[in-house]
Image (cartoon, coloured by chain):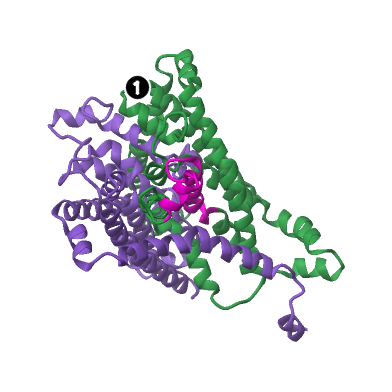
Amino acid sequence: MSNTAKAKSVIPGFNITMGFSLLYLTFIFLIPVGGLLLYTSLMSWDEFWRAVSHPQVVASYKLSFGASFIGASINLVFGFLAAWVLVRYQFPGKRLIDALIDLPFALPTAVAGIALVTLYASTGWVGQYFELFDIRIAYTQIGVVIALTYIGLPFVVRTVQPVLEDFESELEEASAALGASRLTTIRKVILPALLPALLTGFALAFARALGEYGSVVFISGNLPYATEITPLLIVAKAEQYDYNGAAAIGTVMLFAAFILLLVINFLQWWSSRRFSH
Amino acid sequence: MTTVTETTTLTLDRADVWRRATEEPQWVRRLLIGTTLVFLALFLILPLIVVLYGAFEQGLKVWYAAITEPDAAASIRLTLLVVAIVVPINIVFGVAVAWAIAKFEFRGKTILISLIDMPFAISPVVVGLIFVILFGSQGWLGDWLNAHDLRIIYAVPGIVIVIAFGTLPFIARELIPLMQQQGKQEEEASLTLGASGWKTFWYVTLPNIKWGLLYGVILCNARAMGEFGAVAVVSGRIRGETNTMPLHIEVLYNEYMFTAAFAVSSLLTGLALVTIAIKSFIEWHEKRA
């Protein structure tokens, strides 16, 4: 039976579904992305290098990568904490909070952007208290970090939560029975098991933050060399018809995204391997 | 008497020691829950309240006037039009690609799956740029499009294309693992018993995947309506013509019309909340099943 099944599946539709899928992917995705890479490759190396290494662009890389890293780190800590609290403890309103974690996925980034800048401006509900200590959030690099933290918030929670739910309490009990303190058990037994999921969530949050545009442009103030993120520079160059400059920087961001995707795939493979035994 | 009390305290002590070794003390729990709630209140709940407060601060009449004003209404119509095109395309693509991947064995399957994930990783701004370079007036096909009086960039087709690109993975990603996990025995049984391919899909496959499909659709819908970065590059922000709702919000905000900006935002916020509610319902439904 298995032989005939292998030779010819009774299930129809392979050619049409596969054909349509590949055709659609080719036209909407492969040709356009290939087009950008080809466009960039037609530039001379000097022109490409001048575009991607201009001091203003380099300053934007530093801010984009730096703020994304800080945002993802904040999410690593608070995302782990939120996942822990949601899985292990009972408290009123828990299901509502759990559902709301996904809000940054569902809320349009432009809406998040104007909400955050209104909250954190020096006259805003939150910003006014920081103003008392002479700390500005909106229109500074702190504002960029706030926006990038916001949009990356669900990732760590949602990658750690299922792993924590499936975590076998026998392991913790064994550790406790062998005389380990609670803190030692968490550090030596639970955290290592969660490490791949934590890193996956971190990498996803970082990747999302790196390309983010909508939620940042309102709160950042977009000052060159200070609060200008790389995606904003791409938009500005495209609007000035400087396609070469925009394509060069866009290609750099595209490669950063591909590398991150490889890292994420590796982490997920590591995570599933660790889980299977 | 005394012996009984002694054993009780002894077992209590042991239970206490055990609890201390496997659980966190009460005060630690409270501290962790409190910290989490403060963080989530600052980041999730306050932005929500500030949007709704800003939208309704001056009363329902002002809110209603803001969302029915011609340019706002045009942006709502355009957004709905785009969604009406993009979501069905993504449904067809998602179901087709999941069918091919889940029901058949072929080479390069993992590559195909990673390829579908890629639009997630690419910055929306880069997505917009890609199509400006292809179809813009200074782009590769610009002269040809001009000669034939066709407009893609700074027009509706460009908006549809970039949103289709950005939301490509949503439905496929929900369906692929679901259909892989369900296998193909039920379909094979149905086909062996003489049902046609379409009938099998309609009566066997679809009922099995309907919740996953619904979840993919609402997520795809929310993201399509809210897409900003990619649309910002290709739209040209022509009022009443190429402004989707998020772009109209940006225009209003930059013109200091905050109440109107929040009023339009409140619609998208409502959509986001409904999306989350449906997602929670589906998860609750699946856990019970």
Q: Which residue is mark 1?
A: B257
Drawn side of residue B268 relative to residue B136, left or right: right
| Residue at image point 45% right, 35% down | B242
Q: The N terminus of chain A is located in which quarter?
A: bottom right
Chain shown green: that is: B
| Residue at image point 46% right, 63% down | A31
Query: Is residue B53 in view?
Result: no
Q: Kindly give the residue lying farthest to the bottom in the view shown.
A: A3
Tell me residue A240's x, y (percent). Answer: 27, 44
Tell me residue B6's x, y (percent). Answer: 42, 55
Tell me residue A63's x, y (percent). Answer: 21, 51
Task: Give the magenta range.
Answer: B141-170
Q: Nearer the viewer, residue A218 or B8?
A: A218
- Image colour assigned to chain A: purple
| Residue at image point 21% right, 28% down | A122
Drawn side of residue B281 relative to residue B62, left or right: right
Q: Kindly give the residue lying farthest to the right in the view shown.
A: B194
